[in-house]
Image (cartoon, rainbow, N blue to C red):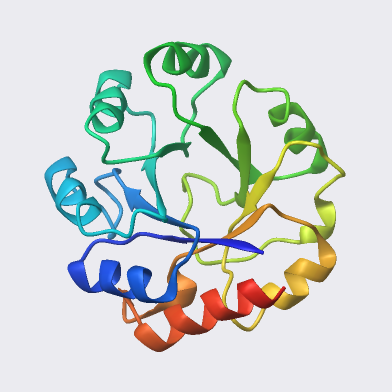
């Protein structure tokens, strides 16, 4: 099973990624987030990242030129939209950048997932719904609500080494997306990082 470790913000995090080899890592470009990184910091971190690991830029209602600049500089390889971005926004973004797009869905019901599947993006990311919260709640949702869909999706929301096995038995995501599940006191933890990546590779 593919795995993305999101919210990398320190050189130590990149060292863990290079050692344990998740398929994707995420840089959060949303200032309210505790895991926020500037464009300059992300560029510095990306320069140290193993070439075999794709970097995903996580944005919330960002201006398209900002995303375009990060893509053009090679700081990010994929774009994750975690806000209120609609079809028109995505079409304009696809004109500006030629990178795969992941659209996050804060899951309320199956109908919303089926509607999101029609959006002009390459992947979905299914996360826990919390009002006024764009993600990163560290809480899971009932994976049984996910309907059969053809579009590949990342599964997020409170995942860790203790529950991704059950999640894999309940649904069939393209990849797991883990952030707080490999942290201790808000920072990436070497043992948890290693454990969750190793477990995902066994599923």
Q: Residue furthest front?
A: 51
The quarter of the rendered structure image containing the C terminus is bottom right
Q: Quadrant of residue 29?
A: top left
Image coordinates of residue 14 in percent, x first then y, are 28, 66
Between 143 and 53, the one lying in front of the other is 53
The residue lying at 47 percent from left, 48 percent from top is: 133
Q: In the drawing, does residue 72 fall left or right of residue 149?
A: left
Q: In the drawing, does residue 70 fall left or right of residue 155?
A: left
Between 18 and 115, the one lying in front of the other is 18
Q: Quadrant of residue 155?
A: bottom right
Image coordinates of residue 106 in percent, x first then y, are 61, 45
The residue lying at 54 percent from left, 46 percent from top is: 131
Q: Residue furthest right?
A: 148
The residue lying at 36 percent from left, 69 percent from top is: 17
The residue lying at 62 percent from left, 37 percent from top is: 123
Image coordinates of residue 55 in percent, x first then y, are 38, 49
The quarter of the rendered structure image containing the N terminus is bottom right
Q: Is residue 48 above or below residue 183?
A: above
Image coordinates of residue 69 in percent, x first then y, are 23, 26
Between 173 and 137, the one lying in front of the other is 173
Q: How many marks?
A: 0
Q: Is residue 31 above or below residue 24?
A: above
Between 182 and 46, the one lying in front of the other is 46
């Amino acid at each position: 099973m593919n795995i993305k470790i999101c919210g990398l913000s320190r050189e130590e995090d990149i060292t863990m990624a290079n050692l344990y080899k998740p398929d994707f890592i995420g840089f959060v470009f949303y200032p309210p987030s505790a895991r926020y990184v500037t464009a300059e910091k992300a560029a510095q971190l990306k320069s140290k990242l193993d070439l075999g690991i794709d970097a995903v830029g996580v944005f919330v209602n960002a201006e398209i030129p900002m995303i375009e600049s990060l893509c053009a500089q090679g700081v990010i390889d994929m774009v994750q939209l975690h806000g209120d971005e609609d079809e028109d926004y995505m079409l304009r973004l696809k004109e500006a950048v030629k990178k795969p797009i992941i659209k996050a869905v804060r899951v309320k019901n199956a109908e919303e997932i089926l509607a999101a599947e029609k959006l002009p993006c390459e992947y979905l990311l299914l996360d826990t719904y919390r009002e006024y919260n764009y993600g990163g709640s560290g809480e899971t949702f009932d994976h049984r609500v996910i309907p059969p869909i053809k579009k590949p999706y990342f599964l997020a929301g409170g995942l860790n080494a203790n529950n991704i096995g059950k999640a894999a038995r309940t649904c069939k995501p393209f990849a797991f997306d883990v952030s707080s599940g490999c942290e201790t006191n808000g920072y990436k933890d070497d043992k948890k990082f290693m454990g969750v990546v190793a477990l995902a590779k066994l599923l």
